[in-house]
Amino acid sequence: MELHQGTVDLESANDVALADRLNAGRKQIVTELQKQIVGQDDVVQLVLLTLFVGGNSLIVGVPGLAKTLLIQTLARVLDLKFTRIQFTPDLMPSDITGTDLIQEDTTTGRRQMVFAPGPIFSNIVLADEINRTPPKTQSALLEAMQEHRVTIQGRTYVLDEPFYVFATQNPIELEGTYPLPEAQLDRFMFHIIIDHPPEDEEFEVVRTTTAIQDPQFTRPVTGADLIAFQRLVRRVPVAEPIMRYALTLVRTSRPKSNKAPESVKKWVAFGASVRAAQYLVLGAKARALTSGRYHVSFEDIRAMAHPVLRHRVLTNFRAESEGITTDSIVDDLLSVVPTPKSGM
C-alpha cells in the first residue's frame, strides 16, 4: 500500500463542501445505526473511519455483542451489496472467490467454461469467524483486500467499488482455530475490540431486542459518496512533524531500533511494519475530517495508535507468560515517544 501525500489541501471550495458532506453523512449514518445498535460508540467510530479511508478491519469480541448485526445494519443503511461468509474448517478458496463451471449452450449444444462469481463479489464482505478456516482459505482474501481484485485460473476479475472486508473473531475459543498469518493481519487497517456494554446500555439491548423490531432506514450516503470521501481523505494536509511523529511511533515499536524502550526490547518479537505508519496517518486524516477539522493533529495520531498497532506489534513468549498485552506496550510507546513542540 502506498501513501500518496501530495500538496493538495482543502483550500478549494469543492473540497470544503465535500468535507462538510462527509461530516454530515457520518452523523446521519450514526443516527440510522442507533435504530438497531445500542451504544458501542467507539466501535462505530472506527468502523466508519474504515469506510472513509477505504480499508478493512478485524472486529474481535465474545459472542452476542452484535458484531455481525453491526456490519449487516451498516450495509442496509448504506444500501450496499452485502455478503456474509461463515468461515468453517471445510471452506475452500473457491467457495470465496468463485470458480469456473462447465455449462452447455442450449442453442448450439456446445459446452464451455463459465465463471460463477463467489461471495467476495460484493461491496461489504463479512468474514465471520475468519480464524476457523485454514490459512490456505484465509489467503483467498489477501488479493481482494489489497488489490480489490481476484485472480482465478490466470484470469483477473476486478471487484466493484466501494469494497470492504470486515472480519470477526471470537477471542475465547482456541480449539479448532487457525491464527491469522502476520501478512494477513497486516492487511487490516484496524483491530477493533468490542466489549460488553455498560449496564444501562445492556439493559436497553435486552429491552429492544425482546420487543418487535422493524426499523426503517434512510440512505444518507451512497457508494459513490464513499468513493469521493476516500479520495478527499488523502487530500487532507499533514504537517511534517506530525507525520514524523507517526513514523517514530512505528519505528520505536521494533526491538532492534536504538530508540526502542526497555518494554519493547523485553517483550516484543516483531514490531510494526511501514503499513502501520500509513494507516496511522490515513486514520488520523479521516478522524480530523469527522471532527470538523481540515488538518491532522498529534491527538489524531495518538487516537489511532491502539487499533492500528495492537495487531502489528507481535509479543514474544516471555510477554505471553507474564500476561503482557500489546495494548500495554502501545501505552508505553505513547508515553515514551515525545510529541514535537512544533506542528499542529
Image: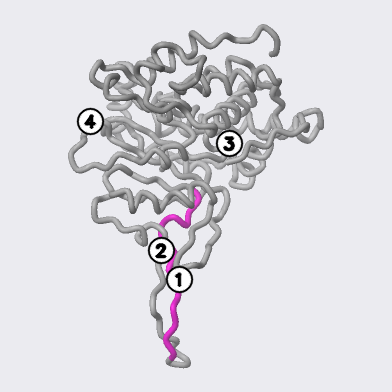
Residue 165 appears in the rendering: yes
Camera-nearest residue between 39 and 120: 120
Amino acid carrying mark 1 in the image: Phe
Q: Do the residues labelled 4 and 2 touch (CB within 8 Å)?
A: no
Amino acid carrying mark 4 in the image: Ile
Q: Quadrant of the C terminus?
A: top right
Q: Name the residue under label 3.
A: 53
Quadrant assignment, res 213: top left
Where does the image place residue 263, in percent across and percent down from the top left? Answer: 39, 13
Camera-nearest residue between 329 and 150: 329
User: Which residue sits furthest right?
Assistant: 12
Task: Tell me the crowding category of disc 1: few under 14, some 14 to 19, or many 20 or more residues within 10 angstroms, Cα based.
Answer: few
Task: Tell me the crowding category of disc 2: few under 14, some 14 to 19, or many 20 or more residues within 10 angstroms, Cα based.
Answer: some
Q: Distance between the residues labelled 2 and 3?
A: 27 Å
Q: Are marks 3 and 1 in contact (CB under 8 Å)?
A: no
Where does the image place residue 283, in percent across and percent down from the top left? Answer: 56, 28
**Element on which disc 1 rests:** strand
Camera-nearest residue between 158 and 331: 331
Mark 4 vs 3, N-terminal side? 3
Mark 4 vs 2, N-terminal side? 2
Q: Are marks 1 and 2 in contact (CB under 8 Å)?
A: yes
**Element on which disc 2 rests:** strand
Residue pictured at 63% horizontal, 28% vertical = 23
User: Which residue sits furthest bottom?
Assistant: 108
Q: Mark 4 points at which residue?
A: 172
Q: What stretch is highlighted in magenta?
A: 110-123
Q: Name the residue under label 1.
A: 115
Q: Are marks 4 and 3 in contact (CB under 8 Å)?
A: no
Mark 3 vs 1, N-terminal side? 3
Q: Distance between the residues labelled 4 and 3?
A: 30 Å
